[in-house]
Image (cartoon, rainbow, N blue to C red):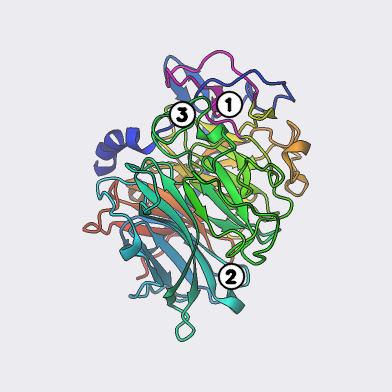
């Protein structure tokens, strides 16, 4: 099949980055989840996922909603009561599906003329996500994260510059963004084309904007543009391999120092955004104050549950995929570990028997709540905790999948309380991040699965959507991308256009 042929050719490109030796540091407690019954297993060079039994498989259907996209990565609503759905296409456009299910002809937002040129056969760059301001109905502010050509100040030979920008809706047309209104909040130069992060989002509890950033790209978090001794993700003097948190409403918030003179990023801090006063590294002059948590390889998918807890799906190197519950100041392990397993920069496919449980600067490494092996697929596609009403069996499950089209769901441990999850890593206990149980989702119609899964989305009613395409890369000549709604089993309906 088209999908099967492309997976093997693309997987090495799609899932790169890594490790380096860490210095001896005082152990402040083991939060790595090593040895959990639900951790992925490693045997004879392969990784496998301990799944719930076949009799526990959940059944759902996919209802076709709209088609004609190239590489749809994200679906969201504006929170303005209009019922519109906004579909982010990697090639640089955001399209609207109106309340009646009609796909509007003109894009809501179009940054194709501002983006780096994409490789149609495979690329991780592009228009990666948008986020509507919590008060969008009143202020018309929408934020976009996309890959631009390398800025003039970027290091010679580097690949591109990822750009976080704000746009305003056209006051004369609510279905159009004013493209002349762009204000660039943040630019991050990238040494390689991979590991760009992805889905920006506003926190429902605090109203701050969260921005996930990859480790810079390449294999093993090493090479050009990567800190030699530790990798970027363990180096708190740079901005890579982290989740940022910024205040787009109070530009004076926090004490915001300028980036160092040789920084490979540029910010609008103090003029276009502020830094929340409780950001965990604000007092450390050598650390970018925007950093909320760190130790990530490619946190391409973030989302919040109904209680405001942050879930980050982080793409692994060669063996393990992971989902973490993220809290302020947390160190999530890369490149010391890949998921719960130790990582060897010199041998990606053989985890060492032992390694540190702490990283820099003396922070306990925090393990994932979900870990998957490559038996499920080549790279994780992060999802959301289901909070809708249509599929009661999915309530409270984290629904996610893999690039090869597999759908799965994770269930929290008995008694786990989402409303009690701590806001700081200093208060985190092993019980807070105990691993979740994973089970397959049996999806119909079966033909919908012969495609690449690129992302998930959610509407105003908290119902979930899956975004898929028939080819491996953002090739505008194909337009095989579709939006599907996840509905109760055998409840599909005809495609709406």
Q: Nearer the viewer, mark 2 or mark 3?
A: 3
- Whether the residues at callouts 2 and 3 have beta carbons within 8 Å, the answer is no
What residue is disc 2 on?
A: 79
Q: Earlier in the sequence, mark 2 or mark 3?
A: 3
Residue position marked by numbered label 1 in the rendering: 340
* Residue 339: quadrant of the picture: top right
> Is disc 1 placed on a helix, strand or loop?
loop
Give the crowd class for mark 2: few <14, some 14-19, many >=20 residues within 10 Å.
Answer: some
- Residue 20 lies, in percent from the top left, at 50, 23
Asked if residue 370 shows in the view, the reply is yes
3D distance between C-alphas at marks 2 and 3: 38 Å
Q: CA distance from mark 3 to mark 1?
A: 14 Å
**x then y, percent, for residue 375:** 43, 29
Part of the protein shown in magenta:
332-358
Q: Quadrant of the C terminus?
A: bottom left
Looking at the rendered structure, the secondary structure element under dot 3 is loop
Residue nearest the observer in this picture, 124 or 54: 124
Residue underneath mark 3 = 18
Of all residues, the one furthest to the bottom in this rendering is 172
Q: Is 440 on the left-hand or right-hand side of 125?
A: right
């Amino acid at each position: 099949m088209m999908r099967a042929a492309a997976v093997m050719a693309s997987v090495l490109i799609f899932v790169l980055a890594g490790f380096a030796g860490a210095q001896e540091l005082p152990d402040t407690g083991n939060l790595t989840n090593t040895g959990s019954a639900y951790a992925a297993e490693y045997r004879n060079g392969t990784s496998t996922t301990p799944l719930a039994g076949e009799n526990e498989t959940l059944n759902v259907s996919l209802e076709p909603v709209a088609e004609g996209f190239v590489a749809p990565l994200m679906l969201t609503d504006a929170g303005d009561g209009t019922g519109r759905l906004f579909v982010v296409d990697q090639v640089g456009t955001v399209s609207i599906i109106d309340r009646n299910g009609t796909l509007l002809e003109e894009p809501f937002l179009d940054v194709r003329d501002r983006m780096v040129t994409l490789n149609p056969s495979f690329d991780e760059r592009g228009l990666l996500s948008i986020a509507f301001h919590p008060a969008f109905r009143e202020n018309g502010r929408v934020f976009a994260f996309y890959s631009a050509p390398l800025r003039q100040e970027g290091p010679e030979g580097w690949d591109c510059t990822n750009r976080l920008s704000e746009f305003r809706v056209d006051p004369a047309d609510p279905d159009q963004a004013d493209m002349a209104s762009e204000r660039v909040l943040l630019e991050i130069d990238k040494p390689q084309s991979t590991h760009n992060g992805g889905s920006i989002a506003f926190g429902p509890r605090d109203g701050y904007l969260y921005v996930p950033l990859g480790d810079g790209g390449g294999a093993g978090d090493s090479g050009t543009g990567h800190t030699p001794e530790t990798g970027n993700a363990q180096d708190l003097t740079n901005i890579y391999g982290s989740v940022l948190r910024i205040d787009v409403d109070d530009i004076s918030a926090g004490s915001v120092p300028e980036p160092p003179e040789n920084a490979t990023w540029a910010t609008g801090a103090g003029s276009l955004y502020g830094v929340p006063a409780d950001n965990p590294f604000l007092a450390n002059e050598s650390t970018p104050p925007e950093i909320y948590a760190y130790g990530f390889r490619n946190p391409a998918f973030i989302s919040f549950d109904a209680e405001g807890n942050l879930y980050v799906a982080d793409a692994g190197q060669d063996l393990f995929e992971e989902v973490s519950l993220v809290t302020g100041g947390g160190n999530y392990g890369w490149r010391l570990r890949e998921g719960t397993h130790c990582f060897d920069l010199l041998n990606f496919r053989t985890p060492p028997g032992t390694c540190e449980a702490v990283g820099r600067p003396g922070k306990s490494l925090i393990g994932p709540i979900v870990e998957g092996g490559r038996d499920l697929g080549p790279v994780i596609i992060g999802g959301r905790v289901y909070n809708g009403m249509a599929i009661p069996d999915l309530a409270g499950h984290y629904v996610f999948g893999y690039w090869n089209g597999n759908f799965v769901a994770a269930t929290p441990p008995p008694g786990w309380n989402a409303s009690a999850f701590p806001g700081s890593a200093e208060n985190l206990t092993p019980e807070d991040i105990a691993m979740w149980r994973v089970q397959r989702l049996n999806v119909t119609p079966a033909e919908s699965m012969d495609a690449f899964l690129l992302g998930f989305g959610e509407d105003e009613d908290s119902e979930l959507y899956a975004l898929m395409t028939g080819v491996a890369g953002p090739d505008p000549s194909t337009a095989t991308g579709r939006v599907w709604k996840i509905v109760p089993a055998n409840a599909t309906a005809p495609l709406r256009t």
